[in-house]
Image: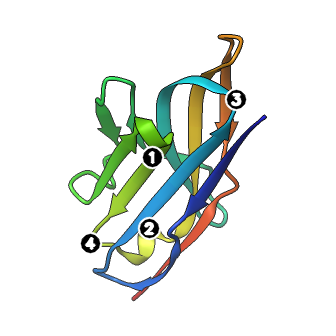
Amino acid sequence: QVHLVESGGGLVQAGGSLRLSCAASGSIRSISTWDWYRQAPGNQRELVATINSGGNTNYADSVKGRFTISRDNAKNSAYLQMNSLTPEDTAVYYCYLRAYDSSFHPQTYWGRGTQVTVSS
């Protein structure tokens, strides 16, 4: 069983910063890709950022230049540094993990989400 625990969300004023963390625990053989998604009320869940096993990253156009995704393989963790936040960034943020389990089977896992609220 694998669990993802997100942290770092909260309330921040526009222009501020937050750093989200996501830690995986359980029977993981290796981690392939970390993603961060977000979902605002009334909207579909959208992909915000991705980092693969080689450290290559991709970002949604709406966050390019403001958000930075990173990973710490030794800690089975991923991070999302969010700068210059705007009220449009308000959403529940989810981490998503693609990994191989102890039997080398590919698996995917979702975190439970952390709320980010940006006030104007």
**Residue, disc 1:** 78
**Residue, disc 2:** 89
Residue 105, placed above or below residue 66: above
Residue 31, placed above or below residue 10: above
Q: Amino acid at mark 4?
A: Ser
Q: Nearer the viewer, mark 1 or mark 2?
A: 1
Q: Amino acid at mark 2?
A: Asp
Q: Residue at x 57, y 35 (%)?
A: 97
The numbered dot on residue 114 is none
The 10 Å Cα crowd at callout 1, few under 14, some 14 to 19, many 20 or more, is many
Q: Nearer the viewer, residue 83 or 78?
A: 78
The numbered dot on residue 84 is 4
Of the numbered discs 3 and 2, the one sitting upstream in the chain is: 3
Residue 69, placed above or below residue 18: above
Q: Residue at x 39, y 28 (%)?
A: 52
SS of the residue at dot 2? helix
Spatial distance from mark 3 to mark 1, Cα to Cα?
A: 17 Å
Of the numbered discs 4 and 3, the one sitting upstream in the chain is: 3
Residue 62, placed above or below residue 86: above
**Residue, disc 3:** 27
Spatial distance from mark 2 to mark 4, Cα to Cα?
A: 10 Å
SS of the residue at dot 3? loop
Of the numbered discs 1 and 2, the one sitting upstream in the chain is: 1
